[in-house]
Image (cartoon, grey):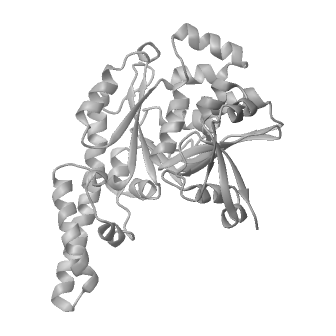
Amino acid sequence: MKVGIMGLPQSGRRTLYALLTGDRAESINPDGKDSVVGIAPVLDPRFDKLVEMYHPKKETRARITVELIPALEENAIREGAVFRDIAGTDALCLVARDFKDDRVYHAKGSINALRDIDAVMSELVLHDLILVEKRLERIAEGKKRAKDEQGQKEEPVFMKMKEHLEKELPLRTMELSAEEIKLLTGYSFITMKQMIIALNVGEGDIASTSLADKIKEKYRDHEVAPVQISARLEAEIDALETEEERSAFMKDAGIAEPALALLTRALMASLGLISYFTVGEDEVRQWMVRRGAAAPEAAGVIHSDIQRGFIRAEVVKHHDLVSLGSEEAVKKAGKQYVMGRDYIVEDGDIMNFRFNV
């Protein structure tokens, strides 16, 4: 599954992509014409705490695939190629610029994140509306020539979608039945995708939530999640060589946790994923699984044999392990739970699977 990183020119989307993937910003797609795919580790303090506790020989973070989408310039939007890149993703992260820098131009001539977000949102809704109208036209033409059973099934759904989009609302906020969702399987509507808005603010504005609050209020019916980040500040943190230096820098800046960590977890959530952990002296590992998955499905993420031969799952809550200090103390306190096939995995669970094949 893949998250698309998109935004207007000079919004900081390439810098953000570089921070997420560890690539050098200046070496990424210098002509800006094609999308670029990379891997971003999920930064999670719960994982860091487990590594600190177990001192494993190997530590493996969960990773998500991210794609840098070409800038949403007017000609790219007009030609439509950029929408094909966006359509190939599973969720979207819109980078909106709210930092001032005279050395970095803005295509609109001024800094206004709300205006820029409005413009992109409108283009995405318009794109889907055009697709819906074209499909309705084809259905109408099909009625004249022959009986079109598929078109007859789709028509009421597409009519409902058209009405929804005409209200300038994304399709992800529309209530659809399981049967209606099944009918739309072959289509790729951009506004069906979950969206995060990464607010790229100035270094001095990282503590202020006023813009994020405005976006939450304005787009409360759009199901978008704003995450505030200063790409420049995150780059400075990332450039420091030791954890002690990073901690001291963040303390001076009044930052409890790098915004990049919040963003990677938000990207994971936008894909409908949660994480669980397996621990031990050999390896501490973070795994991703679909939100709402039962224990056997989570076991299958590790290996299909474990899912096939699943017997039970031994589950410890992360906060219990951290507060009690060891697996032995957790067991003595009766905080290790034995769960069967119906157990729904919760974000942050520490799991050990028993199986037989």
Describe residue 340's horizontal placement relative to residue 244 as left or right. left
In the rendered view of the protein, which quadrant contains the C terminus? Answer: bottom right
In the rendered view of the protein, which quadrant contains the N terminus? Answer: bottom right
Nearer to the camera, 325 or 72: 325
Q: Residue at x 29, y 31 (%)?
A: 215
Q: Residue at x 55, y 49 (%)?
A: 345
- Residue 355 in the image: x percent, y percent? 73, 60
Nearer to the camera, 286 or 319: 319
- Residue 152 in the image: x percent, y percent? 21, 80
In this view, which residue lies farthest toward the top?
252
- Residue 187 in the image: x percent, y percent? 36, 67
One can see residue 67 in this view: no
One can see residue 351 in this view: yes
Q: Is residue 178 above or below residue 317?
A: below
Q: Is residue 112 above or below residue 140?
A: above
- Residue 246 in the image: x percent, y percent? 65, 16
Q: Is residue 181 above or below residue 168?
A: below
When asked about the image quadrant of residue 210, the answer is top left
